[in-house]
Amino acid sequence: MSTLATMKPIARRMMQVAVLLVQGLLVLGAGSGPARAQQAELQSYDVELIIFRTLSSDATAEDGPREADTGPAFLLPDEEHSPFDTGPADSGSSDTGSSDTGARTLSPAAENFPALPASRYQLTAIADTLRRSRNYRPLAHFGWTQPGYPRHAARFLSIDSKVPAGSGLSGRIALTRGRYLHLTLDLVLETATSPGHPVAHYRLQQSRRMRSNERHYIDHPNFGVIALITPSGE
């Protein structure tokens, strides 16, 4: 006769419940193991950005993004022939108006990734060149470190706390990794065109395929982005 059969009914039920609990914990552990392993296997990347305003542009807020521009002339020649640095984006738009509706349509970010120390910046020389230029004005230079999440699980970073106060910039950015790296930007630049006129809103919405360890220029008639993505630890 089995042990369970000889036990009192209450004790037998308690033993059965305990067995079920142990089995459930084993199933949960087996299911969460691969998920934890997948998270641990995600490659981390250092993302560095310069956002700058174009001072010499004759474009207005109603103008759409330009076709593949060569970008600032000081970008290295080896980038001019890369299919990734200035190629057409998946999408883009810009708008203007007297209200701040454009900025408010940005949804909240999901993450606040650790900042990239300035000592690890690799675009400092370009930022200095922008400051000396009469055609461009740097608005923000910052970076962060994050895992390369799959595209269906993108984690957005809000730039609001990353940019200087008074820069007029707001928005969010996501880096994802599938077959290729993709950088998705949803940025708004607010600027006063002239005294007595309403504040203009310029919006940059693009998703760009990227290569690591290469500089990329993301174009807009009124402001642009230079991006560098490097695998962490290199």
Image: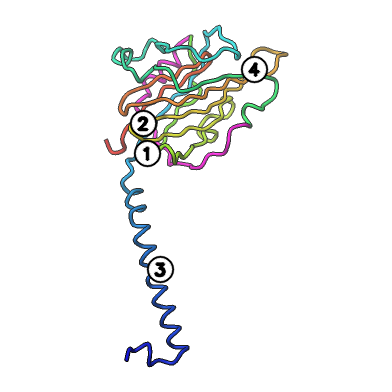
Q: How many other residues sit within 10 Å of disc 1, few (<14), some (14-19) or many (≥20)?
A: many
The front one of 121 and 30 is 30
Say few, some or many: other residues with alpha carbon within 10 Å of mark 2 (under 14 / 14 to 19 / 20 or more). Answer: some
What residue would you read off at disc 4? 192
What's under tag 1, amino acid-wise? Gly
The amino acid marked with disc number 2 is: Leu
Q: Are marks 1 and 3 in contact (CB under 8 Å)?
A: no
Mark 4 or 3, closer to the camera:
3
Pointer 3: residues within 10 angstroms few (<14), some, or many (20+)?
Answer: few
- The picture places residue 231, in percent across and down from the top left corner, at 31, 35
User: Pointer 4 and pointer 3: residues touching (CB < 8 Å)?
Assistant: no
Q: Which residues are magenta?
A: 105-134
* Camera-side residue of 169 and 126: 169
Q: Which residue is mark 1?
A: 148
What residue type is disc 3 on?
Gly
First in sequence, mark 1 or 4: give its number: 1
Mark nearest the camera among 2 and 3 is 3
Q: In the rendered image of this protein, does residue 222 appear above or below residue 3?
A: above
204 relative to 72, above or below = below
Quadrant of the image containing the C terminus: top left
Percent position (x, y) of residue 12? 42, 86
124 in relation to 43, above or below: above
Q: How many angstroms separate mark 4 from mark 2 (CA)?
A: 35 Å
Front: mark 4 or 2: 2
Residue denoted by label 2: 181
Q: Is residue 196 left or right of residue 167?
A: right
